[in-house]
Image (tube, rainbow, N blue to C red):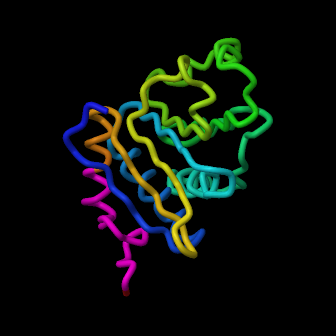
Amino acid sequence: MQSDQPGLRVFLADEAATEALGSQLAQVVSGAGGGVTVFLEGNLGMGKTTLSRGVMRGLGHEGAVKSPTYTLVEPYEHLHPAAYHFDLYRLGDPEELEYMGIRDYFEGDNFCLIEWPERGQGVLPRPDLVITLSREGTGRSACLMPGTQNGESLLAKLQDAGGIRPGAVAGQDKNR
């Protein structure tokens, strides 16, 4: 990664904290303008879809937010910016993404969240931000790493706007 800014690690105590981080990310992205691509990494059950739910609700979606495991993409075109939630877990070959016109999703001001991005390697664009979720004690740890200058800017705005800092629980101090 060509970034001088280190990543950020955030402790997420529970599902609500994971959704709150997603909501804070949504607020920063909606205020930034321009397209954003975020990779969501982590083993099964680490909270990638929960984080995505927080993003979509943070952008104003009021209905259910499900993982598009079988459809590969769930569009939220009524949101601003238009958001697309990808789950590539069941993808057989990255070339399948070309057949669905994947590159069109990354044009304009779209916000693209991609679970299991390693399955689309070679076809997906470089992410602005990579969020890796892993187990930490009774909660989760989210490591946010910028992949572009836009990602560095988003990470800085997340820290400023949401009060997120290393060791934070989506805005609360872990040790409180």
Residue at figure coordinates x 35%, y 35% from the top left: 147
Q: In the displayed structure, would residue 53 be above or below residue 123?
A: below
Q: Position of residue 51 (x, y in %)?
A: 56, 55
Q: Residue 169 in the image: x percent, y percent?
A: 42, 72
For this orientation, the residue located farthest to the left is 4
Against 33, residue 139 (above or below) is below
Question: In percent of the image, x 57 and y 37: which residue is there?
Answer: 114
Image quarter of residue 85: top right
Question: In the rendering, at what x and y percent does residue 171 appear?
Answer: 37, 71
Is residue 79 a member of the stretch shown in magenta?
A: no
Q: Is residue 2 left or right of residue 89?
A: left
State the quadrant of the C terminus.
Answer: bottom left
Q: How many marks?
A: 0
* Vertical position of residue 52 compared to residue 139: above or below: above
Above or below residue 88? Residue 94 is: above
Residue 169 is covered by the magenta coloring: yes
Q: Relative to residue 154, is residue 106 drawn left or right?
A: right
Q: Which quarter of the figure has residue 172?
A: bottom left
Question: Which residue: 60% across, 41% down?
Answer: 115
Outermost residue toward the right in this view: 70
Of 96 and 153, which appears nearest the observer? 96
Residue shown at the point (55%, 71%) measured from the top left: 139
Per the rendered image, the range of residues in magenta is 156-175
